[in-house]
């Protein structure tokens, strides 16, 4: 999820699907509208229009039925937070990506918009010059349009099959369905291996769609169980956003939650969020495990990366872990999940139907590292059972 060092996006925009995604841009900056419109068109998507405020955008929606709306937060007359509910009421399957600069206020608003139904957010550079020169912003934006456009297409009713015009005995062109890409490998569950060791730490990795999934997972576990172990979360987010995300978690769960700090000792009942732009790992110390932060190279195009935390946790805690990979683009977490499994710890993965993007959990599932692939509503109770020793 989000920008530069925090998003697991490839360095070159992926090609759009055969049926162009329909995109609407709503931003009060003429420079931003012009640049993003050009990028959208150059990437092969269908730009249905641009709007300088939310009211114009809603009017254009009724005429052009976009698949994806790139929605700025601060606009005159009707801003993004006011327009979002009206857009989703008119088109529940619409994919809305919020755009905002990296401020504490905008991070708070963006996370609230995710709770209201926006599928993601992207952090804009603070200046028009930054927007013009930031290749990371452009790449992340195009990747989100591709992913969410495909998600909207899956929600549309299937078009009726057209009869083949080829004469009998001839070879007709294969259908679109037959040409659809197939998974590299099917999901395979790993046999459960219970060591009798209770988890001493809970690990969560997530990206696109993660804030909502993380909150639901923690709520499903419950504060009473969360008090038994420290909880460490890597959510792909830029700086500023992770601190606000931790505040939202604390308010939702009722337990202390904050960005992890260098050499901070882990304590049961506390929730540690990897700071945006920094890897969060672990190390053994005389008084017990402590957090280690570093500004090393991106891993899986991410910083923070799930793999960094999970690999360290495997080395520090061995089999005494409980972990889950939630919704997100890319494959971050797969190598770390393998390290946890080899150490004897259980790994869960969110299922495709409830994931905003089944990249990260799908990669873990296809690698045969997940002992359970569960809908989001079942993940919290499953982790609660692992932490309390009730899992069978």
Image (tube, grey):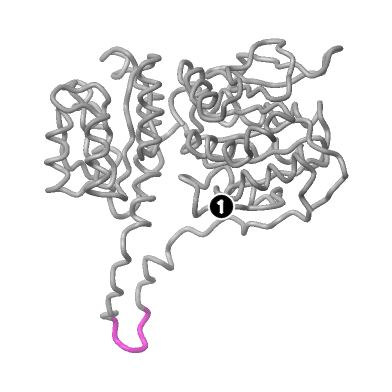
Q: Please state which of residues 391 and 170 is positioned toward the viewer in this rendering.
A: 391
Q: Is residue 301 left or right of residue 335?
A: left
> Which residue position holds label 1?
375
Q: Is residue 93 left or right of residue 386?
A: left
Q: Residue 357: horizontal and vertical position, in percent?
A: 48, 45
Look at the image and give the residue range highlighted in magenta: 166-171
**Mark 1, residues whose alpha carbon is within 10 Å: few (<14), some, or many (≥20)?**
some
Q: Please state which of residues 161 and 114 is positioned toward the viewer in this rendering.
A: 114
**Residue 320 vertical placement versus 28 (above, below):** below
Please name the residue shown 63% across and 32% down the image. Answer: 223
Please name the residue shown 67% across and 46% down the image. Answer: 348
Q: Quadrant of residue 180?
A: bottom left
Q: Quadrant of residue 134?
A: top left
**Residue 331 vertical placement versus 288 (above, below):** below
Report if residue 168 lies within the magenta region. yes
Q: Residue 25: horizontal and vertical position, in percent?
A: 22, 34
């Amino acid at each position: 999820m989000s920008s530069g060092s925090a998003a697991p996006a490839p360095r070159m925009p992926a090609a759009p699907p055969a049926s162009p995604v329909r995109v609407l841009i709503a931003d009060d900056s003429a420079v931003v509208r012009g640049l993003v419109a050009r990028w959208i068109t150059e990437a092969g998507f269908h730009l249905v229009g641009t709007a300088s405020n939310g009211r114009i955008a809603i009017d254009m929606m009724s005429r052009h039925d976009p698949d994806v709306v790139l929605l700025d937060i601060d606009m005159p007359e009707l801003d993004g937070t006011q327009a979002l509910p009206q857009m989703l009421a008119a088109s529940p399957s619409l994919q809305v990506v919020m755009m905002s600069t990296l401020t504490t206020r905008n991070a708070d608003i963006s996370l609230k918009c995710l709770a209201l139904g926006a599928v993601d957010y992207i952090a804009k550079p603070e200046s028009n010059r930054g927007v013009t020169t930031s290749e990371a912003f452009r790449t992340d934006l195009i990747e989100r349009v591709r992913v969410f456009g495909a998600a909207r297409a899956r929600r549309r009713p299937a078009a009726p099959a057209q009869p083949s015009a080829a004469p009998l005995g001839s070879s007709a062109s294969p259908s679109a369905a037959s040409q659809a890409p197939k998974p590299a490998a099917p999901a395979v569950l790993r046999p459960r291996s219970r060591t009798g060791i209770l988890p001493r730490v809970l690990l969560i990795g997530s990206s696109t769609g993660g804030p909502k999934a993380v909150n639901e997972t923690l709520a499903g576990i419950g504060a009473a169980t969360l008090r038994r172990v420290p909880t460490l979360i890597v959510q792909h987010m830029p700086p500023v956003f992770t601190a606000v995300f931790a505040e939202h978690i604390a308010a939702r769960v009722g337990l202390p939650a904050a960005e992890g700090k260098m050499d901070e000792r882990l304590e049961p009942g506390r929730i540690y969020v990897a700071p945006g732009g920094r890897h969060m790992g672990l190390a053994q110390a005389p008084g017990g495990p402590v957090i280690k932060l570093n500004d090393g190279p991106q891993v899986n195009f991410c910083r923070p990366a799930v793999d960094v935390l999970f690999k360290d946790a495997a080395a520090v805690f061995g089999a005494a872990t409980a972990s889950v990979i939630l919704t997100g683009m890319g494959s971050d977490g797969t190598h770390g999940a393998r390290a946890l499994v080899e150490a004897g710890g259980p790994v869960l993965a969110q299922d495709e139907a409830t994931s905003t993007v089944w990249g990260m959990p799908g990669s873990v599932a296809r690698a045969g590292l997940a002992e359970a692939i569960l809908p989001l509503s079942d993940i919290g109770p499953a982790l609660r059972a692992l932490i309390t020793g009730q899992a069978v």
